Amino acid sequence: MSDTAAPLGTSTGHRRAGRARPRYGAAILWTLLTVYGILTLYPFFWLVISSFKTNTEFYERPFALPAQWQFDNFINAWESSRLGSSFMNSIIVSAGSLLLTLFIASLASFVLARFRFKAKGWVMAFFVVGMLIPIHSTLVPLFILMKQMSLLNTYWALILPYTAFALPTAIFILTAYLVSVPRDIEEAAFMDGTGVWGLFLRIMLPMSTPALATVTILSFLHAWNDFSFALVFISKTDMKTLPLSIANFADGYQTDYGLTLAAMTLAVIPTVIMYLLFQEQIMKGMTAGAVKG
């Protein structure tokens, strides 16, 4: 009995050790992910708590919680720099450029992904090359163009460039996603009597929601956070976007960090909301194609 028990005991021990290794590996992985999550979220946490501090407390206790929470920072920041008007301007510019980008990119991507024509490779290469152009190198020629077209200090002065520079990336992402859609779905739709527009509106657009969500986030963030284009093309106070209004809190002599960080906290809120709205679709887009069948 003892001779038989030894191998059995040894086998059981190996099995327990084999089970323990994945558990230790999972524990290490979750620990690393937790640390990474904390490091990622801490800058946002620091921004929020610092927005409730005075200038003196910001310098003396930069990483501590506020001794006295200064809620007036948000009120003063909103009123002193006319953030309400800037918020509305940023919303109009970001929404306008986003809608134009999604409309044009979805149509172009549908044609490039589902149709065959001779110049298809050249057209796709044209958009890919657009991704390589440095955006800020076009400021001077764009300024001259906007001046000749009398578009300076208008919403179109920002909407059109934002759309133009967002299109190459948007078309690249959407085309790559639509190409992965099986041809069987398209053929079945045509057999059921669906036309080209029906295929685009009823089948391709709903199926490409994860890719559209990714394009929405990227395009919105660029338009919402851009400073250089707004600085060059907008000079009227009533037309200033949010980044320009936040820059007013700093001058050549001093910076009111309490008001600046309060304004930045308010400016971050729409981007967080956008991500929370589309995070599920973005996750689906990242995992699309990972599982076949």
Image: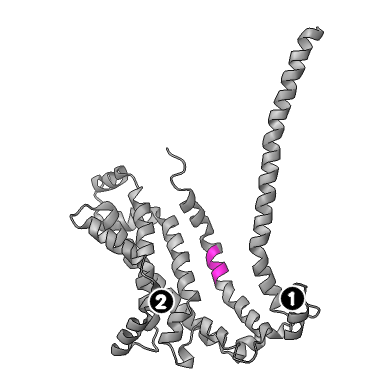
Residue at image location 54% in from the left, 86% down from the top:
245
Residue 61 vs 106, above or below: the answer is below
Residue 286: in magenta span: no
Looking at the rendering, in which quadrant would you find the C terminus?
A: top left
Q: Closer to the camera, 268 or 18?
A: 18
Alpha carbon distance from label 2 to label 1: 34 Å
Q: Residue 248 location, x and y as percent?
A: 57, 88
Q: Residue 135 location, x and y as percent?
A: 39, 73
Give the amino acid type for the residue marked by disc 2 in the picture: His
Residue 263 vs 189, above or below: the answer is below
Report if residue 198 is visible in the image.
no
Residue at image location 40% in from the left, 80% down from the top:
158
Residue 274: in magenta span: yes
Please tell me in which quadrant of the rendered image residue 196 appears: bottom left
Give the left or right position of residue 228, taking residue 148 as reference. right
Report if residue 292 is visible in the image.
yes
Who comes first in sequence, dot 2 or dot 1?
1
Residue at image location 32% in from the left, 67% down from the top:
104
Circle 2 sits in a helix, a strand or a loop, which is it?
Answer: helix
Give the left or right position of residue 225, taking residue 129 as reference. right
Q: Which residues are magenta?
A: 271-275
Residue 105: give its label: none
Give the left or right position of residue 270, taking residue 26 as reference. left
Residue 223 vs 118, above or below: the answer is below
Q: Identify residue for label 1.
A: 62
* Tally of numbered discs: 2
Q: Closer to the camera, 196 or 34?
A: 34
Q: Identify residue for label 2.
A: 136
The dominant secondary structure in magenta is: helix
